[in-house]
Image (cartoon, rainbow, N blue to C red):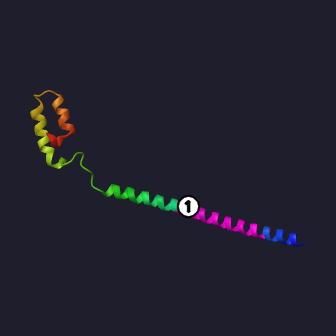
Amino acid sequence: MGRRLAVKSLLKLVRDKDRQLEASNERMVQLAGQVGFLQAKLQEAEGQIKLLQPPKPTSPNSSQHDGADLEQEKADEGRQPHHRWWRRVWPWKG
C-alpha cells in the first residue's frame, strides 16, 4: 500500500511539472512572436531613417573637388590615359 501511494505522488509530481513546462513553452512562443514583431518594426524604422538621411558623398571632400576635378581632367586629356584612372580612384591625391 505504501508503494502505491509513492507511485501516485510521483505521478502527480510529473503531471504538475509537465503542466509547468507546457505553460513555459506557451510563454516562450508568445515572447518569440513579440520579438519578431519588434524586429520588424525596428527594421521598418531603420529603413525610414535611412531614407530621410542626406546622400553620402562618393569620395572624401568631393564637394570641394568637384570643379577642380573637372578642370584637372580637361588638363589631363593630353596625357596618357593611365593618368586619368589614378585621379578617379584617389581624387584628393591629384
Q: Residue at x 59, y 63 (%)?
A: 28
Q: Nearer the viewer, residue 81 or 11?
A: 11
Identify the residue position indicated by label 1 in the image: 32
Q: Looking at the rendering, which quadrant does residue 46 occupy?
A: bottom left
Residue drawn at x 17%, y 33% as measured from the top left: 84
The residue located at (19%, 35%) in the rendering is: 86
User: Which stretch did the figure color magenta?
Assistant: 11-34
Three-letter amino acid code at disc 1?
Answer: Ala
Quadrant where the C terminus lies?
Answer: top left
Identify the residue shown where x is 32% and y is 57%. Answer: 52
Q: Position of residue 69 (x, y in %)?
A: 14, 41
Q: Main secondary structure of the magenta part?
A: helix
Question: In the image, is 69 to the left or to the right of 59?
Answer: left
Tell me if residue 22 is in the magenta stretch: yes
Label 1 crowd bin: few (<14), some (14–19), many (20+), radius 10 Å: few
Rendered location of residue 5, percent (x, y):
85, 72
45 w.r.t. 66: above or below? below
SS class, disc 1: helix
